[in-house]
Image: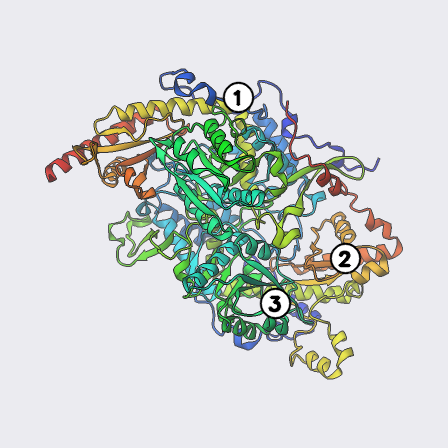
Amino acid sequence: VNETPLQREAAVTIFERGAPGRRAFACPPLDVPEVAIEELLPAHLIRAQPPRLPEVSEPEIVRHYVRLSKRNFDLDSGFYPLGSCTMKHNPRLHERVAALPGHARLHPLQDPERAQGALELMWNLERALGEIAGLPHVCLAPSAGSHGELAGVLLTKAYHEARGERRRKVLTPDTAHGTNPATVTMAGLEVVKLASNADGGVDLEDLRAKAGEDVACLMLTNPNTLGVFDANILEIAKIVHEVGATLYYDGANLNAVMGISRPGDMGFDIVHFNLHKSFTQPHGGGGPGSGPIAVSERIEPFLPVPAIVRREGEGAGLPAGLGGSRPADAFALDHDRPQSIGRLRGFQGNYGCFVRAYAYIRSLGAQGLRDASEVAVLNANYLLARLRELGVCERLPLAFPQSLEALAEQDGNAGAAALAGEGANAGAGLCMHEFVLSGGPMKRALKIKTLDLAKRLLDYGYHPPTVYFPLLVEEALMIEPTETETRETLDGFAEALAEILREAGEDPEVARNAPYTTPVRRLDEVGAAKRPVIRQSVA
Amino acid sequence: LTRYTSATEADRAAMLAAIGVSSIKELFDRQVPPEVRLRRPLALPEGMAEQDVYEHLRALAARNVSAEQELSFMGAGMYDHYVPAIVDMLMERSEFLTPYTPYQPEISQGGLQVMFEYQTAVSELTALPVSNASVYEGPSAVASAGYLAKLHNGRSKILASAGLHPHTLATLRTYAHGYGMEVLEIPLLGGATDPQAWAQAIDERTSAAILAQPNFYGAVEELPALAQAARESGGEQLVTIAQVDPIVLGVLAPPGECGIDVAVGEGQALGNRLDFGGPSFGFFAAREQYLRRMPGRIAGETTDVDGRRGFVLTLQTREQHIRREKATSNICTAQALNALAGLVYLAWLGRRGIVELGRLLLARTHYARQTLCALDGVEPLHSELVIREFAVRLTGGGGDGHGGREALDVAAVRRRCLEQGVNPGVDLHALTGREQDRGGLLVAITERRTRADIDRLAEALGAAVAAERGRATVAA
């Protein structure tokens, strides 16, 4: 009775639309002599029945997918504070320049002399990313963050092998993204988990106990998935390097520190970037991404092929650019790297993502990138402050680092020092670009879970934060507002959370049965996994 | 104030007051130790206005020669097919372009249904019942399929046909070194996988047997016989894997009907731009028994509390965010938007279109091969049947000392053609480094290359080969 129009519209797939004989495609006429297909292919290799693709007209396709699109929430429509995903604005300029035929219709095997603009762009992007990371060498090839991680672990393996060492263990903190341990296994190494300390950083005692000659690498995110910058990072790097292991930086949270602190200066050997997070490549509903890596000198010989090289002073023989000027230097692809781990994929990487990331870096420049990180951290702390002010944090306290109040309760002096911004606990109660709340107290007091809160947020027009991650926080809610949101948006979101808690105090069933206004309501995920239906049965 | 942030001075003051700190600097001072702070601005150029960035990116684009500006017969893994306008229009929609992976299904039904439809389309195309929602791209999809085989049977050896794309072979070796498997390359005989060498190399230690259809040299492989031979020598546990070109699956027998267990490939030909190599998408389809070892996202159908049909990400217990070190793959972000392009393209082609397009490619490829091989100094590199791409050998007048003709300098021939505005294809030896590929040129045909274009290629190539032969004679 109270169904919304979108709810009333039954989900119909493209395979259930159309009619025999309908079509959108007009095949170009056969302009070469006709030869019977049986003369060109043996009978047993000719497909007997055509694949049962849809039979639909162009207007049907357009309407079908435009209607489907309206069943999606997206960043252009509303606030999307998904922790560790950096859902910042995607400038449309980037789509425009990426679509220029000189970029979009450039064949990946085009002769390097005829792809100088692309190679120069990649070279410039490599230099810029290297500067941001504080590391001298960059490879753009990996297709996403997890692919960059795989590259990083394989590089570590190659580095140790070249020194005649077979190190099997990779340390990952319990706050790590799931891709870290999954990558380690895929690269044939063994995961050893590290505990976190009370501040949410790496437990140094645990690290010292586990750091040995059999450790290949420590994979770390800094700031980590709790939004905590590990202040012990130099000590961590020292411990890791003393046993001969490498230090890997998961760049998912780089948006907190651009122009402020560099992984290379922290002691990291290998860094991956997520161009689809910090550098505005649109997420596309689950990709494409791009996961370049930056490395230190000792890792460089092992970088994947191909490498982009600049040949200084060799530009004279090249085609002229706009305005007829000839460049001084020539760019080329170098495949001859004897110690390289090899290829990670076909061609040179997700160039379309490079164009967008490069446009972003050139738009913002050094000052703009720093401003982006500063405002990202300002926004996160402001949102946290608003949630405190509205009483939300009484039910959903900050998980790490501990609050000033908790600190003062334990140790009055430390609390006073922290309040004054001094001492080891100066960061108490603050966060970097994101923060993690625990829904434990809310669950006990109001009888609603973090999941219920998230689902109720949908009715308020917000994408919920990341939920139930990191795993060490009870009923976790991980919030990353990013720098591109206005103060008014943050205020509105804080008030929505407060309102949902108030409402749950009166009647927890409201949140428990949410959402009500979305195209579909809560879905049976258990049933979907038990009896998987993963394709349409087609007639 | 930069143009993508909105915090004015007044905003900042109010926000800092609410936080209880005096400056943004204090926020960092209290959390990031001074020893790791960057004490200078990043050494990057100053920011630029939107119009200036546009001009800079346009100037860089202008220094590339795209398929818009020359008559290109380049292929070898990515192809200049026409991308229909509706693909661009749908990919540009905010609702598809800007969301994250659909973690909240109630507000992601559009993206989830697209995945479900995409999986259906890939299943129909490959005649395999199970498909995921996309992987990165072609070569790494093959490497991931090798990992699936390892998880499936625990064996240690991968057999790979030399007919696989050289980038695929290289990527497979990189990954296999990681997950601890040996890769054995099986040579070609003529232009296709040597059936005897293939059958002899397979034993009970062989985990996976991998082929391309059509192969890198354009040849149509005897997929059913090779798959059967692999099964006979390697037993039930062996996994047969094919990297297939999806654009010809309206014409060629699909992998699922050729004894193949896992079909993967590069999806670029389906509605995706060249983009100098990416982003595109990789597809990954398999028989039912491999469902729980598949990498990546899979969308499944279900119902909501009111009984409405809906879609969710399913079988997530395979995945990294749940299983961590026990996951079947580390993949997280894949290529959802590019897979959408592939799906819209397949709907646009439709049930009849995919057959018509395949037949057109077949006919034009046949015509192009005949026309080029009628030229002096151009001969087929192999005599196998071809479907959308073929390899020729450019030869000089003299002998090569092995009973054949000497190979011509392909780079020099290509330069002559490029001067005429014709890009005749890919220099094979430059890409593979294989001795037998000297003089080789790989020529790709799409529906954008008409008979007139092919005739123009023949003219340019004929003249270039003649000139290069003349030069070679003079030099001798």
Of helix, strand and loop, which one carries label 3? helix
Report the residue at 64% width, 75% height from top: B22
Q: Chain of mark 2?
A: A
Tag 2 residue: A497
Report the residue at 45% width, 18% height from top: A43
- Number of other residues with Cα within 10 Å of mark 2, as a class: few under 14, some 14 to 19, many 20 or more: many
* Residue B84 visible to the viewer: no
Q: Is residue A85 left or right of residue A298?
A: right
State the CA–CA distance, disc 1 to disc 2. Answer: 52 Å
Tag 1 residue: B352
State the CA–CA distance, disc 3 to disc 1. Answer: 61 Å
Q: Quadrant of the N terminus of chain A?
A: top right
Is A386 in front, or is B391?
Answer: B391
Of helix, strand and loop, which one carries label 1? helix
Q: Position of residue A417 (x, y in %)?
A: 69, 82
Q: Quadrant of the C terminus of chain A?
A: top right
Q: Amino acid at mark 2?
A: Leu
Question: Residue B9 has which mark?
Answer: 3
Q: Amino acid at mark 1?
A: Arg
Q: Position of residue B170 (x, y in %)?
A: 41, 46
Question: Residue A113 has which mark?
Answer: none
